[in-house]
Amino acid sequence: MSTRPIGIFDSGYGGLTILKELVRQLPEYDYLYLGDNARAPYGNKDFETVYAYTLQAVQWLFDQGCSLVILACNTASAKALRTIQQNDLPNIDPQKRVLGVIRPSAEMIGNYSNTGHVGVLGTIGTTLSQSYPIEIAKFFPAIKVTQEACPEWVAIVENNTIDTPYANTIIQKHISAILKEDLQIDTLLLACTHYPLLIEKIQEHTPINIKIISQGSIVAKSLKDYLARHASIESKCAKNGNRRFFTTGDVQDFNSHASVFFGGELHAEKAIL
Ligand code: DGL
């Protein structure tokens, strides 16, 4: 029987919002989570840095036995996925696979909007890369995409300052900016996996008629379809329901924050990349 877990990578806690849905929709698989908390945030780092860090993380997950890795991070998906898939994987091991979160979200987002006007909230790296407007146009050419970078939001999650007046002000600032830029937006995509951890605050500042879409369930559904279509990859994934958590940061900090975000007690291990 296979012992290979599915690797889930994020710069920090954000990927837990993806893992939570994967565990809900695909509970039978083993998952190995890696958060690069020591080097988060990635959103304001340049292309070369995000690519180098992401490649290190992917290589580390392969070394732990993963043959399928999900970049549960939009910034890494925007800046590193294509290069890793096209340039690195053929040399590392052509049998291994790395998938991201942007394409599955772009494939689905147009189905949520009635007005055809969608807002994308992400990091500076994700929005500057233009990955979302480009990918969404492939599936929904008529959709108008407006982007807003929310650089402070990841730090609010990583530093656990969610319940502060500062967080309130900053969240309100970006929501009202994007809704002012296009008055017809009826759908907001949380295009950073950290943002669903702020969902209650985001909802407080968003009119009730505007849909707020998190990526977790979209990515889980997409992975389910992918595994159904790729039997040779699926057969390598272990199915014992095991979950292991690794962080490059402080293990105690990770355990206390991640257990709040993920639900249930966690016992993370230290990862040295
Ligand atoms: N959660 C990640 C994303 O989806 C990265 C956030 C960051 O490290 O800046 O973009």
Image: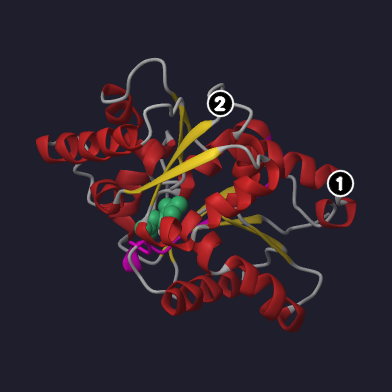
Determine the quadrant in which ligand 1 lies. bottom left
**Residue at left 22%, top 51%?**
159
In this rendering, position of residue 17 left or right of residue 99: left
Dot 2 or dot 1: first in sequence order is 2
Look at label 1 and name its amino acid.
Answer: Arg
Q: CA distance from mark 2 to mark 1?
A: 28 Å
Quadrant of res 48:
bottom left
Look at label 2 and name its amino acid.
Answer: Ser
Asked whether disc 2 touches disc 1, contact meaning CB atoms under 8 Å apart, the reply is no
**Residue at left 51%, top 67%?**
79
Mark 2 crowdedness (10 Å alpha carbons): few <14, some 14-19, many ≥20? some
Q: Is residue 203 magenta?
A: no
Q: Is residue 186 visible?
A: yes
Q: Is residue 22 above or below residue 158?
A: above
**Residue at left 22%, top 33%?**
172
Task: Return the residue at label 1.
Answer: 229
Task: Return the residue at label 2.
Answer: 113
Q: Is residue 20 above or below residue 269?
A: above
Which mark is in front, 2 or 1?
2
SS state under label 2: loop
Q: In which quadrant will I find the N terminus?
A: bottom right
Q: Which of 4 and 59 lies nearest the eye of the viewer?
A: 59
* Numbered tag placed on residue 77 in the rendering: none
Where are the magenta residues, as a range? 26-43
| Residue 125 placement (x, y as % from top left) | 40, 62
Quadrant of res 41:
bottom left
| Residue 95 placement (x, y as % from top left) | 81, 70
The response on whether ligand 1 sits within 8 Å of label 1 is no
